[in-house]
Amino acid sequence: MQMKDIDHLVMGSFEIADGYYSPDKWIIPEIGAVGKSGFELQNVGTTGGVVAAASFNSAATGLFDAVLCLAWQKMDEGAGAFGRGGGGANEYWTGQFPMSPITNFARRTYAYMDRSGCTEEHISMVRVKQDQCAMKNEYAQLRLGLTLEQVMNDALLAWPIRRLHMCPTTAGAAACIVCPEEKAKKVTNKPVWVEDWLTCHQGGALTMAEDPTSSTLRHACDVVYKRRGITDPLKEIQAWEVYEPASPAELMWIEE
């Protein structure tokens, strides 16, 4: 396929972390997409996920035969102030809470530890396991050969989060073409079928309160499991790919 075969684009990048705005305005001419329909969106660390979901939705409407799904990040050139120190978008909503990925996960992890019995050692064990997996992947960004002692003695950022618990900044891009079923059969002999997806969001303010008892992730899973007839996820699902911006996220979100 060539750009002339694409009739819609869905693009995404977490602009604040990169240090610039509206990157789609300069990318569109570079990829030959001037005049094509489409839009650019962001959702912080899960931007790639919502770009994919928006692409699936666009193709499922029947309005487009070929949707280019494109996401990227250039954090190696950004100042990184959002990730390190915070950048609340509105003082009314975020003034009581220094918003950054580090402080956000510190708060959530503390609440999780309080209700589950999880300890700092458990969190660090997850990080060691993640590193052991990375050591088997030659394309992994970090392959450190970590020990439990190294992780537990690493620099403390905001208790109980340590530097090695957080993901690194990076630069990269990914793209795929999403088509309705009949079009996909004509484009390739080996299409990857997407059977179901769901996006759920909570809105509003950040507070110092504990995590809400209702979870959009849990709700999304419940809905998709029911729609696909899944009654025992542990037995029926062979592989999971969980977004893990910080090591404790794996423990919290796998449970949900």
Image (spheres, grey):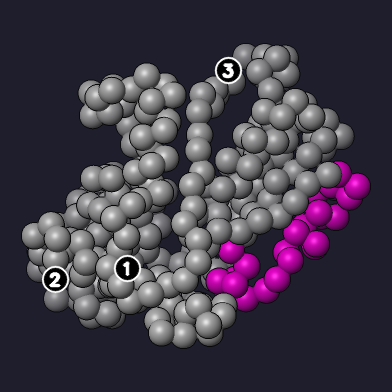
- Three-letter amino acid code at disc 3? Lys
- Three-letter amino acid code at disc 1? Phe
Distance from the alpha carbon under mark 3 to that under mark 1: 40 Å
At a point 70% along the width and 14% down the height, the residue shown is 182
At a point 71% along the width and 55% down the height, the residue shown is 40
Q: Is residue 70 left or right of residue 45?
A: right
Q: Is residue 87 above or below residue 40?
A: below
Q: Which residues are magenta?
A: 14-36
Mark 1 or 2, nearer chain start: 1
Residue 33's spot in the image, x, y percent? 84, 47
Q: Secondary structure at mark 2?
A: helix
Q: Is residue 238 above or below residue 113?
A: above
Q: For mark 2, does the 10 Å Cα neighbourhood hold few (<14), some (14 to 19), or many (20 or more) residues? A: many
Numbered mark located on residue 105 in the image = 1
Residue annotated with mark 3: 190
Mark 3 or 1, nearer chain start: 1
On-image quarter of the C terminus: top left
Q: Is residue 234 left or right of residue 203?
A: left
At a point 24% along the width and 74% down the height, the residue shown is 162
- Tell me, yes or no, if residue 69 can be seen here: yes
Distance from the alpha carbon under mark 3 to that under mark 2: 45 Å
Residue 250's spot in the image, x, y percent? 27, 52
Would residue 50 be counted in the magenta stretch?
no
Residue 176 falls in which quadrant of the image?
top right
Q: Secondary structure at mark 1?
A: helix
Residue 192 falls in which quadrant of the image?
top right
